[in-house]
Amino acid sequence: MVRIPIWISNRHVHLSQIDADKLFGKWHVFEVVKDLTQPGEKATKDTLILQWPKGKIEHVRVLMPVRKFTQVELSISDTFALGIEPMVRISGNLQGTPGLKLIWSAGEVDLPFGAIVAKRHLHCSVKEAQDLWLESGQNINIKVWWERGLVFENVEVRAKDTYELDCHLDIEEANAAGLKMGDRGELVK
């Protein structure tokens, strides 16, 4: 049995450098509040407002480092609140996704695309993937046993030399199973 640490993700924004400059100003320094599980990934003190015709969500955390394209990761409930179509996608697969407006003190950005519900996924190094007989892009299942135990199906493997082993679930998925940060699941092939 292979035990996999669980990382629970709430709504957040990954900004491009261009959008970060428009929203916070060119010389803004993002203050890190904590390191995340994957090396180099950090949560900042900074937050944004997301807006779309049906509603808005305030205090959405900005994560660093900057990316090539701005990406907003939401829960399915968040998409209902904003009035946008929920599109479950692996991070970085943004083509055809809905956009929305990002707002903060220095400005606004009308994002033409980039709002996703993150597909559940397993991060692992290439060596860990080999040791577990997994391949990047493969879909696996992760079983959790707690009082509300269940099996998370279609967990996409993401193998990269810089990744460390953990399964990323969004907050709604974790709540459905009664999970908390650091709980572990079992790899089911």
Image (cartoon, rainbow, N blue to C red):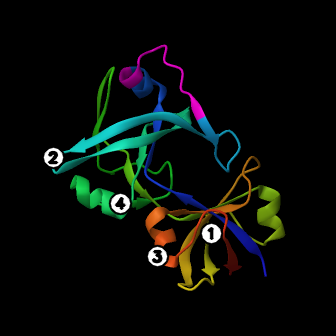
Question: What label does residue 65 carry, if any?
Answer: none
- Residues tagged 3 and 4 counted as in contact (Cβ below 8 A): no
Seen in the picture, residue 78 relative to 21 is either above or below; the reply is: below
- Residue 122 coordinates in the image, percent (x, y): 64, 63
Query: In terms of image quadrants, where is residue 153?
Result: bottom right
Outermost residue to the left = 53
Q: Earlier in the sequence, mark 1 or mark 3?
A: 1
Label 3: which residue?
176
Residue pointed to by mark 2: 53
Q: Which residues are magenta?
A: 22-32
Q: Nearer the viewer, mark 2 or mark 1?
A: 2
Disc 2, SS:
loop
Residue occupying the point 75% across, 74% down: 3
Task: Residue 87: give its label.
Answer: 4
Q: Is residue 112 left or right of residue 138?
A: left
Cβ atoms at labels 2 and 4 below 8 Å apart: no
Q: Within 10 angstroms of label 3, few (less than 14), some, or many (20 or more) residues?
A: few
The question of residue 165 being in magenta is answered with no
According to the picture, the residue beneath numbered tag 1 turns out to be 138
Q: Position of residue 169 (x, y in %)?
A: 54, 64
26 inside magenta stretch = yes
